Image (cartoon, rainbow, N blue to C red):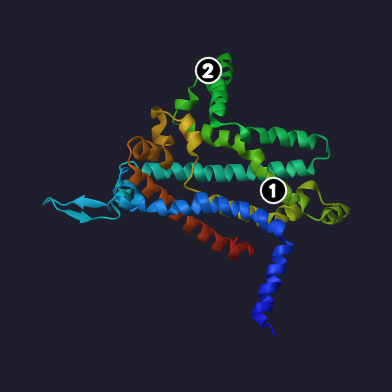
């Protein structure tokens, strides 16, 4: 006679076969993360080695330092210390956090507002057109966006500066001015990603029970009151999840965008960890240093996700773990 464990395994296998299409769909992202995320973790040991391309990851020696007497001693955290002790470390960390939190506090509220406006629109034929136009910038590369910004903000013949000169003012080189450059970065990112970020909020809005709105309208609730007491509380778990996922990449301030927009004249306000790693770690072939910084970012991101997940769970009974 079959025991309970054997019966449980058979029932589990039957359920897997029954829902095989769903498991197959899950298999695709799992294989992706396994190949491109987890397997490369083996190479994280480069951060603790003096990596030499000819010797490979395994053959490269562990990091050492030369003592005053000429001898060598093991120093596994040499590359971490080089990054933390860099003259630019404080500036890099400050710029990275400013841009990351700035994008979080600007892009997420704008995406929520855009989603609500689209959902509340009474002209149903206009909604798909507006959503499509808002999605399109996401698919533009930062090279194209830089060209658009240059056409708008160039000091010589940019549209914005033409208007400034027409009003009697002096042209401003926005992309090389340390005061205006951070705003250009934040606003251009918000314009490019707002529509795409709103997709998940629009999907969440579609799941709200319409009877709630009907009851509120019967009671005489205004559109603002319906948004405040029905819409926002209903999508609060989705908002919390999006914020949690964004916090996990808080040290990724957008390398592609910054690399296209910045220049040496704005390094003081534009240089972030990723751009510094690109110059110091890759252009100068300091692969161990680049890996050490990447590992540092990963650890910080993991700790931030764990901390924020615990805080959100206490405040709203919502979490991703």
Q: Position of residue 71 (x, y in %)?
A: 14, 53
**Which residue occupies the foreground of this view, 144 or 284?**
284
Please name the residue that numbered disc 1 is placed on.
201
Q: Quadrant of residue 148?
A: top right
Q: Residue 226, relative to residue 277: is it above or below? A: below
Q: For marks 1 and 2, give the one nearer the viewer.
A: 1
Identify the residue at horizontal 32%, vertical 41% (top origin). 286
Q: Tell me the quadrant of the picture where the C terminus can be found.
A: bottom right
Asked if one can make out residue 189 in the rendered structure from this viewpoint, the answer is yes
Disc 1 to disc 2, C-alpha distance: 42 Å
Q: Is residue 151 left or right of residue 117?
A: left
**Residue found farthest to the front:** 1
Q: Residues within 10 Å of mark 1 (few under 14, many from 20)?
A: many
Tell me the element at label 1: helix
Asked if one can make out residue 248 in the rendered structure from this viewpoint, the answer is no
**Residue found farthest to the bottom:** 1
**Which residue occupies the foreground of this view, 148 or 317?**
148
Q: Residue 129, relative to residue 37: is it above or below? A: above
Tell me the element at label 2: loop
Identify the residue at horizontal 57%, vertical 28% (top origin). 145
Q: How many marks?
A: 2
Q: Residue 259, relative to residue 40: is it above or below? A: above
Mark 1 or 2, nearer chain start: 2
Q: Position of residue 260 (x, y in %)?
A: 48, 30
**Residue found farthest to the right:** 218
Contact, CB < 8 Å: mark 1 with mark 2? no
Please name the residue that numbered disc 2 is placed on.
169
**Residue found farthest to the left:** 69
Q: Is residue 75 left or right of residue 154?
A: left
Q: Position of residue 122 (x, y in %)?
A: 83, 40
């Amino acid at each position: 006679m079959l025991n309970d464990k054997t019966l449980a395994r058979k029932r589990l296998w039957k359920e897997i076969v029954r829902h095989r299409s769903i498991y197959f769909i899950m298999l695709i992202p799992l294989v992706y993360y396994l190949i491109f995320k987890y397997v490369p973790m083996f190479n994280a040991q480069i951060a603790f080695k003096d990596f030499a391309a000819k010797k490979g990851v395994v053959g490269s020696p562990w990091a050492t330092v030369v003592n005053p007497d000429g001898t060598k001693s093991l120093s596994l955290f040499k590359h971490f210390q080089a990054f933390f002790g860099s003259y630019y470390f404080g500036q890099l960390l400050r710029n990275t956090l400013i841009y990351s939190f700035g994008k979080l506090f600007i892009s997420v509220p704008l995406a929520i507002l855009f989603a609500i406006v689209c959902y509340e629109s009474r002209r149903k034929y206009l909604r798909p057109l507006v959503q499509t136009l808002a999605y399109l910038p996401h698919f533009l590369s930062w090279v194209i966006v830089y060209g658009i910004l240059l056409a708008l903000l160039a000091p010589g013949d940019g549209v914005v500066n033409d208007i400034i000169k027409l009003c009697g003012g002096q042209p401003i080189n926005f992309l090389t001015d340390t005061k205006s450059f951070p705003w250009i970065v934040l606003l251009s990112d918000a314009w490019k990603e707002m529509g795409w970020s709103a997709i998940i909020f629009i999907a969440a809005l579609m799941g709200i029970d319409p009877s709630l709105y009907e009851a509120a309208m019967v009671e005489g609730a205004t559109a603002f009151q319906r948004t405040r007491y029905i819409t926002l509380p209903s999508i609060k778990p989705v908002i919390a999840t999006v914020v949690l996922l964004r916090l996990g990449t808080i040290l990724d301030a957008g390398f592609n965008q910054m690399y296209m927009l910045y220049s040496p004249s704005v390094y003081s306000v534009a240089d972030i960890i990723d751009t510094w790693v690109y110059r110091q770690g890759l252009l100068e072939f300091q692969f161990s240093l680049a890996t050490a910084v990447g590992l540092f970012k990963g650890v910080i991101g993991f700790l931030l996700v764990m901390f924020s997940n615990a805080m959100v769970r206490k405040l709203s009974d919502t979490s991703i773990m």
